Amino acid sequence: MKALAAIGYGPPENLRIIDLPVPNAGPGQIQVRIKATTINPTDLRVITGEYRDMLPVEFPYVPGNDFAGTVTAVGAGVSNYHVGDEVFGQALPRQLRAVASPTRPSVSTGALAEYAVFEADTLLLAHRPASVTAEHAAALAISGMTARAIMKIAAMKRGQTALVIGATGGTGTSLIPLLSRSGVNTTATARSEAGRELVLRLGANAVIPHDPAAYPSNVDVVFNLALFPDRIADAAKSLRPGGKMVTIMFPPATQQDLRRNDIELHFVLDMDGGYGGMPDVAEAAANGNFTAEVASVFPFEKAVEAVLAYATEKPLGKVVVSFSDDRGA
C-alpha cells in the first residue's frame, strides 16, 4: 500500500509517499480502507522533532490521527464492527501511545495511508452516518469531539461572554456555532478578511486581530486554541475574576503561566471520550446539528502538498486528504 511517511526528523517537505505492507487486524482490531483523513498540529510537531524529547518516534513514521473509511477486516473478539461498515474517528499513531488513554487506547498504524488498523474497543471511533460525507466525518473527528468537550467544561450560560483565540482552525470553526446556539456573546480572533467573514458567518458577534492589545476585558471564558504557555498570560488578562481559561494546547499551561490565581484553568485532552465520544458526534452530525469547516481537499497523491499548505497557509478550517475510490484493492 501507499503511505505518507517521515523518513527522519525534518521539515514537512521531507515527507515521502512510500510503499509499506498492508497492516493486518489482530485480536480486538479492525482494518480500515481509508477514504479521508486530515492534517493536524500533532502531525507537524512530531515529524519536525518538536516533541522529540517527550515522544520520540522511529522511522519510517506514518502520521494521521482522524479518518473516515470502510472496514475491510475484523480481528478476533470484535463484535461492534463488521466488514463493509463505514466508520470514522480519531486515533494516535501507535508510537504516541504514551499520551493515549491508559485503559482504552485509541491508536492506529497511522491514518495517512491507504489502509490502517485501529483498536475497536474505544469511544473515539464510531459508525459514520450515511448523511455525512467521508471528508466531513474526518474533519469532524478531532475538532468535533474537542469542541463538544470544551463546551461542557466551560458550562456557559446564555448571555455570558467568550473569547475564542484561534477561531479559524478546525476546533474553532466547530466551536463558534455551538456558542452561538447557546446564546453566548462571542469575540473571535482572525488573521485575514476571509477569516473575519468566516467566523461572523459561523455566529461570532465580534472579530478582532491576533493582537493582545485588542483582547476584550472582563470575559467569562477564554477558549485558547492557539497560544502556547509562554503567550497565554496576555489572554488571561481578559478574564474577569473567577473566569475560566479553557485550553487545548500541548504542553499544558500552568497557573503560574497565567500569572493569575483568581481564575480557573482547564486543560482538555479527552482521550477517553469522557465528555462525549465519537458516537455522540455522529448523532449530532446526522441530525444536522454539527458540521466541520473544510478549508481544502487534496488527493492523496498530493499529500505532501497538503501538509505544506497546512503548515504555511494558516487555512480556514480543516485540510483534508482524500483517497480515490477507484484505486486498486
Image (spheres, rainbow, N blue to C red):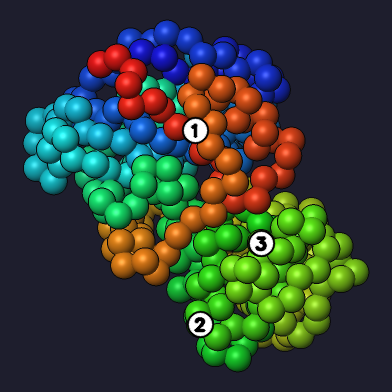
The amino acid sitting under disc 2 is Ser
Residue drawn 39% across and 10% down? 20
1 or 2: tag closer to the N-terminus:
2
Q: Quadrant of the N terminus?
A: top left
Mark nearer the viewer, 3 or 2:
3
Q: Is residue 1 left or right of residue 50?
A: left
Residue drawn 45% across and 60% down? 291
3 or 2: tag closer to the N-terminus:
2
The amino acid sitting under disc 3 is Leu
Q: Secondary structure at mark 1?
A: strand
From this viewpoint, which residue is outermost toward the right? 213
Mark 2 is surrounded, within 10 Å at the Cα level, by few (under 14), some (14 to 19) or many (20 or more) other residues, namely some
Give the labeled residue for mark 1.
321
Q: Position of residue 328 (x, y in %)?
A: 29, 14
Asked if residue 23 shows in the view, the reply is yes
Q: Quadrant of the C terminus?
A: top left
Give the labeled residue for mark 3.
198
From this viewpoint, which residue is outermost toward the front? 326
Distance in Å between CA atoms under marks 3 and 2: 19 Å
Q: Secondary structure at mark 2?
A: loop
Q: Position of residue 138 (x, y in %)?
A: 42, 44
The circle drawn on residue 182 is 2
Distance in Å between CA atoms under marks 1 and 2: 32 Å
Instruction: Pick the residue in front: 167 or 261.
Output: 167
Residue drawn 66% across and 57% down? 168
The amino acid sitting under disc 1 is Val
Q: Secondary structure at mark 3?
A: helix
From this viewpoint, which residue is outermost toward the bottom? 159
Q: Is residue 106 left or right of residue 174?
A: left
